[in-house]
Amino acid sequence: MTRFPDRLVENDHAQTQSLRSTKTQSMKPKHLLITTFLLLLAGTLSACAGGATTASSWPGLFVNGGTAFIAYNTHVYAVDASNGDEVWRFPAEPDNQITFYTEPTLTPDEQLVVGSYNNVLYSINPDNGTMNWTFTGARNRFVAGPLATERGIFAPNADKNVYALDFEGNLRWEFELDSESWAQPVSDPECTCLYVTSMDHTVYALNPESGTLLWRSRDLGGAIVGSPALSEAGALYVGTFGSAMLALDSQDGEELWRFPTEGWVWSGPALSEDRLYFGDLNGYFYAVDATTGTQAWRIGSEQLDGPIAGSPLVEKGAIYFTTESGTIYAVDLEGKILWSQPVGGKLYTPPANPDEIILVTPIETDDLLVALTKAGAKRWAFNPNPE
């Protein structure tokens, strides 16, 4: 049975107590994300106990060429990124026993792989949405998106295991963490390393061929639920629920520097040239020197409208990020806000950019996928359930 990490309880006790003492209708924006965190955790606990659960989260988005793949609720959707038309959905008819919230990924041999909250990892034909195979060896839901490299498929699961599969879905090895991993791993082919973050406050480096442990970091002061960023110089960057962004040496996991933030950091940073860009759940956005950990600039929460959960997108001299309040912002590389556009609903998933558009995936609204120009104008929207 999955257990709430003791150190997470200790380090984040004050913020959790604040959540418990606040009424839902007057809840600060940050607390809505904490509520999601606790609901996901509660769902995992009850699933271990064998009870029926109703889980919810935000969409997983992956873009390949001119197609956007969205995993949300009872379907995985393929959408034409040029006009928002649906190409296919999987399964063709909804099954309430199957729900998807993880980021899909494409394997080198062009299979679309996505995990489900029914404990199954699916391989789907990305051209027509038919199923290739399933992996049913996991004992809990897939919260993290899988990673696919030339060495195979690597899928963390809420049962605390990382599963390594070949491209036919056969299990090669499994490695047990001390707690769950909710983030897609990162691979470094130069050192034959697989980096996995965990809610147990640590980062693991595994050999992708054998699944053996290469190193494990010390306690970093808070749960890590975002994917790390890896630099060419060998630094690994992770944000934590200890209100910090850290740089680790990818060779041994030793801490290189630590940058304090105003709030919890949910997602990993975007690394572009010599800077890291990321937001926190108190609604601040940062640019930090990737080598030294010093702040280049910061946008305060008074200029933005809510918590920032997803990693930003850096594209052609602009940075795009979203807030829980349903707004997408564009800023330049010096931190000047170029424009902001309310999309509606809530935005948690990182934006994506096929061709010359920006894609976002709001929830709690009719449109599941919205395309905007790089000037912020709405191009089209995909509604999976039109009347």
Image: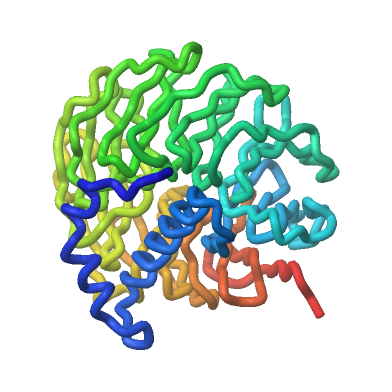
Camera-side residue of 229 and 142: 142
User: Which residue appears farthest toward the bottom when viewing the image?
Assistant: 25
Camera-side residue of 311 and 219: 219
- Quarter the C terminus occupies: bottom right
In this rendering, position of residue 387 left or right of residue 36: right
- Quarter the N terminus occupies: top left
Q: Position of residue 244 (x, y in %)?
A: 20, 49
In this rendering, position of residue 265 left or right of residue 54: left
Whether 299 is drawn above or below 9: the answer is below
The residue at 31%/57% (across/down) is 279
Camera-side residue of 326 and 46: 46
Whether 90 is drawn above or below 336: the answer is above
Which corner quadrant of the image does residue 386 belong to? bottom right
Q: Position of residue 27 (x, y in %)?
A: 32, 81
> Is there any visible trace of residue 190 in the rendered image?
no
Which corner quadrant of the image does residue 253 belong to? top left
> Is there any visible trace of residue 162 in the rendered image?
yes
The residue at 76%/58% (across/down) is 95
In this rendering, position of residue 85 left or right of residue 112: right
Q: Position of residue 330 (x, y in %)?
A: 42, 63
